[in-house]
Image: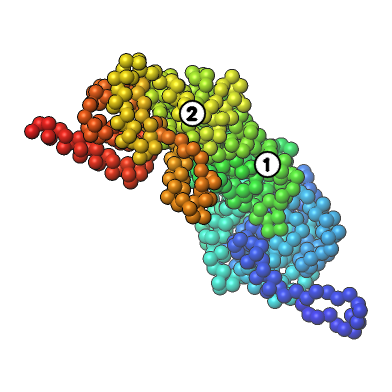
Amino acid sequence: MTLPDTATNPAGADRTFQVDLRGLVDLLSHHLYSSPRVYLRELMQNAVDALTARHALEPDAPADAFGVRLYADGSVVRVEDDGVGLTEADVHTFLATIGRSSKRADRIAEQRGDFIGQFGIGLLSCFLVADEIHVLSRSARTPDAPAVEWRGRGDGSYTIRTLPASARPRPGTTVTLTPRTDAGEWTRPAQVHALARHFGSLLRHPVTFDDGTGGGTSPTASADGPGVSVNPEPAPWARTYPTPGARSRALAAYGEEVFGFKPLDTIELDLPAVGLRGIACVLPEAVPAGRRHGHRVHVKGMLLSEQAEEILPDWAFFVRCVVDAESLRPTASRESLYEDDTLAAVRDALAERLRDWIARAAASDPDLLGRFLQAHHLAVKSLAVHDDEILRMLLPWLPFETTDGHTTLDEFARTHRTVLVTSSVEEFRQVAAIASAAGLGVVNGGYTYDRELVHRLPEIRPEASVADLDPATLTAHLDPVDRETELAAAAYLAQAREALAVFDCDVALRTFQPASAPALLVDSREARHERTRSQLAREQEGGLWGDILGALRQEAPRAQLILNQLNPLVRTAVTIDEPELARTSAEALYGQAAMLSRRPLRPAESSLINRSFLDLLAHALRKDS
């Protein structure tokens, strides 16, 4: 394009922006289109739009009367269609102008509502792989319309010629590209064929490909000559099958072909209001919470995007979808969807379809629901915390670690009217066996989200009661020993308390099941942290840091070592009257209980366990000698 002449554009007159087409193409390749391969999609899209217009012009023509033919032999790439074609005025409107006023563009967009693409710069994408674009077209709107040739170049220049009708005997358009040497990756015959199948496998118009060797003829070849069909069959959901089982298997096989995994199940999607059909494939394995998968979205059969996250809500992490829609609006690059009210409504409707699938599985296929939750329960829990509908739907079915084993909250609440929940994994491990023997229903709330979800159980089952498990709750369910036994053990218990004072640990004697458990160490992470802070404050008395910690100091809760009078080892230990041996045995019982809790041991506790074992061994050796 050249600068306007000043004689015809005097000072103060309107001027036209000058466009550097090479710079514009560079902008397209780096910021609009994800890859040069989109040039073929744009050409196919224009061809399909032309066929749509031709069918509107000749509605009585058979559906397969008009088609698209692709040709690539390594030296040229050609896309030919039997569409409505272009007049010379159309060529000036569509090909010779990069932009139009917004008012005109809006009118054209309304006229092109049945087309895949809207008014835009799609043809310019061909400059990503070629320095010259040749278009030969003949309009079907006028019986004796001449052919029109447009030849555009990468430097921004173009020529338009009107040719005799014999230059193109039938209506339609042919676009021919002469690829640049550096574009071979995208214009080799095999690649063109692969791209055509990738983008156009679900197109409703017949599309064929020919590589110029003459060997591409197949039973699905074009009637006009050699050419392998790019889309020999309609979309799998648009076919008929002899049985529902056959349909289900075909959809699952298609999902596996597209996504590379065997779906746990397939969910058929059908939204007639927007002309959307497709399937959602349930992933067979767990995915990290919060990770979102892209979905394959076709618009009127043309592949728009393989990574369209916006088609489903964030919580639908467990499926990957492939859909074809009529009314979704592409963005300018036609590689993603425009966020508007229609897309929001589609997203909500598809979310409802997924919820319906979960509800059906819960009502009629518990085995499928079990396999689904086994794979995805961790991520489902993370979503249930924030999504009340997911919470109501799935909380009763989610598995938790409990004193009854791994079970659902719904089943657990049936047998335990009061559900107790621990604040950490180690607390659960400390009390699980003893709480189970005492008939307490305890859920491990130490895993991420679990404690919060368990506390929301009454929202689903109002008759259920949920409370945090604390040491007082547990010890209240342990039976006290009789007074005579308590008095007989008093001396030993005093020695044990003195020995374990360094750990801020009290000692008590109770009876509880199982009898094989000699002792229970009741302690919490918060209590240990509070004792550590108090100890640090005592060590820092007098300084600024000591004043700060002193202001935060509370009465540090003490741990409790509860000895089991039903255990033979404990019954023997409480009769020890030798002070040193009594202290050593108490330390050994404390060390064993600390290890059984499976919490990390502090250095002092590890040292105590080693020392008490050696002291007991030395005592036994002295006794034998």
Query: Left or right: 623 with respect to 289?
Result: left
SS at badge 2: loop
Give the residue type at disc 2. Leu
Residue at x 56% of width, y 30% of height: 455
Q: Residues within 10 Å of mark 2 (few under 14, many from 20)?
A: many
- Residue 398 in picture, x, y percent from top left: 52, 30
Q: Which residue is mark 2?
A: 469
Q: Earlier in the sequence, mark 1 or mark 2?
A: 1
Pick the front one: 580 or 94: 580
Quadrant for the C terminus in the image: top left
Q: Quadrant of residue 516?
A: top left
In the foreground, 546 or 260: 546
Q: CA distance from mark 1 to mark 2?
A: 42 Å
Here the colouring is rainbow
Q: Which residue position is annotated with label 1?
A: 347
The quarter of the rendered structure image containing the N terminus is: bottom right
Q: Locate residue 364, reporting x and y percent.
A: 55, 23
Residue furthest front in the image: 542
Q: Residue at x 82, y 52 (%)?
A: 111
